[in-house]
Amino acid sequence: MTKINNKLVIGNKYSNNDISTVFKCSNQGGMRRSLKTNSLILIAKHNNSLYDDVWDNNGILYYTGMGMVGDQNINFSQNKTLLYSKEKNINVYLFESYKSDEYYYAGEVEVAGNVLEMDELDKNGDLRRVFKFPLKRLNNSVNLTVLDKDVELSMEEKIKKVRKLPVHELKLRAKNASKIKPVSKSGEVIKRSRDLYIAEYTKYRANGKCDLCKNEAPFNDKNGYPFLEEHHIINLANDGPDALYNTVALCPNCHRKIHILKAKKDILKLQKAVKKYLIAEKDLESLEEWKKLFERNVEKLGN
């Protein structure tokens, strides 16, 4: 069967009606199967606070499986279709949306590694298991160009939704976001990019003060929140985890300082700050992870 690649232009924006007309699929849902065109169309809505589909630095998109309530089932409906799409020669196409009825066409994709299983909250706020499919674009010769204003508006909308969450739910989402394990037998763990819930809770617990200099944030953002920046003590590029036991909130000046000078005393101070948070919150699980991560420095840090 002829593929549909030549009917759409990578990087162009299309409407919901365009997608359903070209692929002869439903105009609803995030995973749309079309038997008529032997296709599976995936929609990644980046302004959705329930599903967090993110790209990593290696060009892999971690796409959340189907199912909004309760544990997801890898063999349910289009989850199964995507899982076996290569074996069954089903063409998979990706669209990314940053605002209503506008979809950037990212081209054809394929599952590029181990499907991940992780904890997230469903739309009712209950903890459940979800699947993250690592997707790779088949045509990387064409760069994806998204208008800055679309990304900014989408992120602002998502941040507003996240900041409306009760503190206990924000923390739970932040903790669960760092718990990833592969479904495959190989046990290989795939790196993820930073998580919005972790970033927001890290800044929340700092209570408006920089974790390094301990001064108040230099200004408030346009929504009235103290302006601090999330920082990973061990950088993601160096395989540091995107987790609450590895993140701090810094003022812009200290953030630049820590990246440029990399002073050992400052790094140890940040480690101690995180440990203090975890002890105060009686987060024994994260505290154990903190000890594993910084075990070489435990003796120096004391209590």
Image: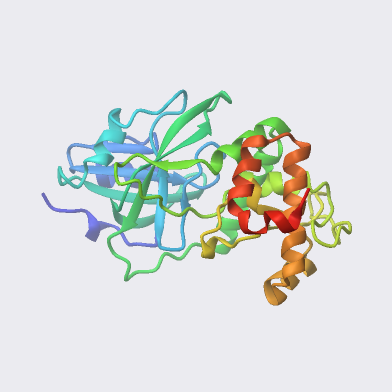
Q: Determine whether, in the image, residue 279 is placed left or right of residue 53.
A: right
How is this picture coloured?
Answer: rainbow
Tell me where residue 139 sits by quadrant: bottom left
Towards the viewer: 219 or 95: 219
Is residue 95 in view? yes
Residue 176 on image: x %, y %? 56, 37
Q: Residue at x 72, y 69 (%)?
A: 264
Estimate the x, y position of residue 3 in percent, counting from the top left: 18, 53
State the image coordinates of residue 222 (x, y, percent, origin top left): 79, 54
**Residue 219, quarter of the rendered image:** bottom right
Residue at the extreme left of the image, as rendered: 1
Left or right of 111 on screen, residue 190? right
Nearest the viewer among 57 and 284 is 284
Using the image, determine if residue 216 lies above or below residue 158.
below
**Nearest to the observer: residue 205 or residue 226:** 205
Residue at the limit of the structure toward the front, as seen here: 299
Determine the residue positioned at 71% across, 36% down: 164
Regarding residue 157, the answer to whether it shows in the image is no
Above or below, 37 relative to 12: above
Farthest bottom residue? 260
207 left or right, relative to 79: right
- Please provide percent x and percent y for residue 167: 72, 34
- Closer-to-camera residue (115/301): 301
